[in-house]
Image (cartoon, rainbow, N blue to C red):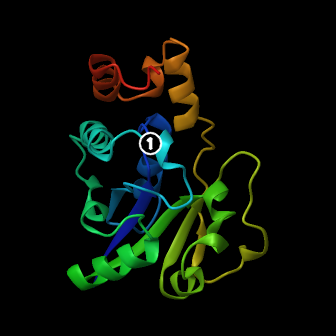
Amino acid sequence: MKMKVGLYFGSFNPVHIGHLAIANYITEYSDLSELWFVLSPQNPLKKKNTLLDEFERFKMVELALADDEKIKPSDIEFRLPKPSFTIDTLTYLKERYPNYEFAIILGADNFNSFHKWKNYEEILKKYQLYVYPRPGYNIGDFTNHPNIKEINAPIMEISSSFIRKSIKEEKDVRYFLPKAVYNYINDKFLYRN
């Protein structure tokens, strides 16, 4: 039987407790054996100038997941052409790990722009999508699609943009971030300007 791995794609700019709570919920309450945080160096749908250096972002993901057996960081997209297209990453992973079955994890907010993804019909045909709730979003006409699983995870209203804005405004965000990530951001004076 193939090992089933969930791929949680993201900019993780920075990774925060909302990401971790969702990942933890999905690994505990689904059929996935593992979940990989796949850091996207450059998401084609996001402005590059808002992104911290990918190696800094990946370091924070590594710090956040340092002691987890089921949830792991992945820098697979660092070795692929930029910007990162999910279909290309999936094709590469399928060749590299033929004995694994991959599923995609995404929030309902990102699912709403799924039709803008390169070759989204092919992704939907070949891969399962685990969609978790986000405030103000639903999956619309896809509720009964055989490859879409709605995950009843707790709704997280924390976002990386909120954290970046708060740091810039010199707010204390220590409880929104894993301790090691919070310390890393402070030590390196990240997101200050």
Asked if residue 75 is positioned above or below residue 148 in the image, the reply reads above
The amino acid beneath tag 1 is: Leu
Percent x, y of residue 162? 58, 30
- Coordinates of residue 82 in the picture (x, y in percent): 37, 64
- The residue lying toward the viewer, choosing from 36 and 79, is 79
Answer left or right for 21 relative to 137: left
On screen, residue 184 above or below 11? above
On screen, residue 98 above or below 61: below
Residue 126 screen position, x and y as percent: 48, 87
Q: Secondary structure at mark 1?
A: loop
Kindly indicate the quadrant of the structure image that contains residue 114: bottom right
Residue 79: image quadrant is bottom left
**Residue depicted at x 56% and y 59%:** 45
Q: Residues within 10 Å of mark 1 (few under 14, many from 20)?
A: some
The quarter of the picture where the N terminus appears is bottom left
The answer to whether residue 97 is visible is no
The answer to which image quadrant residue 156 occupies is top right
Q: Position of residue 59 (x, y in %)?
A: 25, 40
- Residue, disc 1: 51
63 relative to 147 in the view: left or right? left
Residue at (42, 37) in percent of width and height: 14
Query: Measuring 41% from the left and 66% from the top, which residue is drawn there?
Result: 84
